[in-house]
């Protein structure tokens, strides 16, 4: 590895696993909780408010020994659609891609409508996802409530 790069690296590299990069600053903890990483039994590195040439400040998550699934990647996209995922094998980037929004999410958020049946019955929560400009809208498939991802 380039010695200059090694000197400037704030968070150490991983040998095998996943790097979730370019998370907008302030969203790292949300992604950490969304992916239930507190229950992960391998090394997890969470970097918050790191300098970024692209977006100013960013958060980053490194998961040793785990390659992120498509479902996990879709969950990340809801809260951090500009995120980049890198799969690392033997210390090298084996695959790199931008997250993409799913059409439907299951059990990711709670419907904000207090009268929605999903808030009173034990059932799978489903929301359709749409991107309008830079805004992500989520529509409950049971009560049709339409809201922002931040709601």
Image (spheres, helix red, strand yellow):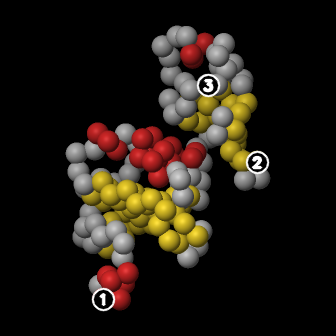
Binning the other alpha carbons within 10 Å of mark 2 as few (below 14), some (14 to 19) or many (20 upward) gives few
**Rounded to the nearest whole Å, what is the CA distance between mark 3 and mark 1?**
50 Å
Look at mark 1 in the image and give the residue it sits on.
Answer: 3
Task: Label 2: state its secondary structure.
Answer: strand
- Measuring 51% from the left and 34% from the top, which residue is drawn there? 108
- Residue 109 place in picture, x, y as percent: 55, 31
- Residue 68 place in picture, x, y as percent: 38, 51
Q: Nearer the viewer, residue 18 or 97?
A: 18
- Measuring 36% from the left and 72% from the top, which residue is drawn there? 10
Q: Quadrant of residue 41?
A: top left
Give the numbered dot on residue 111: 3
- Residue 120 place in picture, x, y as percent: 55, 10
Of pointers 3 and 1, the one earlier in the residue sequence: 1
Q: Is residue 112 above or below residue 60?
A: above
Q: Is residue 122 above or below residue 34?
A: above
Q: Are marks 2 and 1 in contact (CB under 8 Å)?
A: no
Q: Is residue 38 above or below residue 123?
A: below
**Rounded to the nearest whole Å, what is the CA distance between mark 3 and mark 2?**
20 Å
Binning the other alpha carbons within 10 Å of mark 1 as few (below 14), some (14 to 19) or many (20 upward) gives few
**Number of disc labels:** 3
- Measuring 30% from the left and 70% from the top, which residue is drawn there? 13
Q: Is residue 27 above or below residue 128?
A: below
Task: Label 3: state its secondary structure.
Answer: loop
Look at mark 2 in the image and give the residue it sits on.
Answer: 132
Of pointers 3 and 2, the one earlier in the residue sequence: 3
Q: Nearer the viewer, residue 92 or 135?
A: 135
- Measuring 27% from the left and 72% from the top, which residue is drawn there? 91
């Amino acid at each position: 590895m380039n010695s200059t790069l090694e000197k400037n690296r704030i968070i150490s590299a991983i040998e095998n696993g996943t790097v979730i990069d370019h998370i907008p600053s302030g969203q790292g903890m949300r992604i950490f909780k969304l992916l239930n990483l507190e229950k992960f039994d391998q090394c997890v590195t969470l970097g918050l408010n790191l300098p970024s040439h692209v977006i100013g400040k960013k958060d980053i998550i490194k998961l040793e020994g785990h390659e992120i699934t498509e479902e996990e990647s879709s969950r990340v996209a809801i809260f951090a659609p500009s995120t980049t995922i890198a799969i690392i094998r033997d210390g090298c980037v084996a695959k790199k891609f931008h997250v993409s929004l799913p059409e439907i999410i299951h059990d990711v958020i709670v419907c904000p409508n207090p009268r929605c049946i999903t808030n009173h019955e034990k059932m799978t929560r489903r929301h359709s996802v749409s991107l309008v400009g830079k805004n992500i809208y989520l529509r409950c498939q049971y009560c049709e409530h339409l809201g922002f991802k931040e709601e």
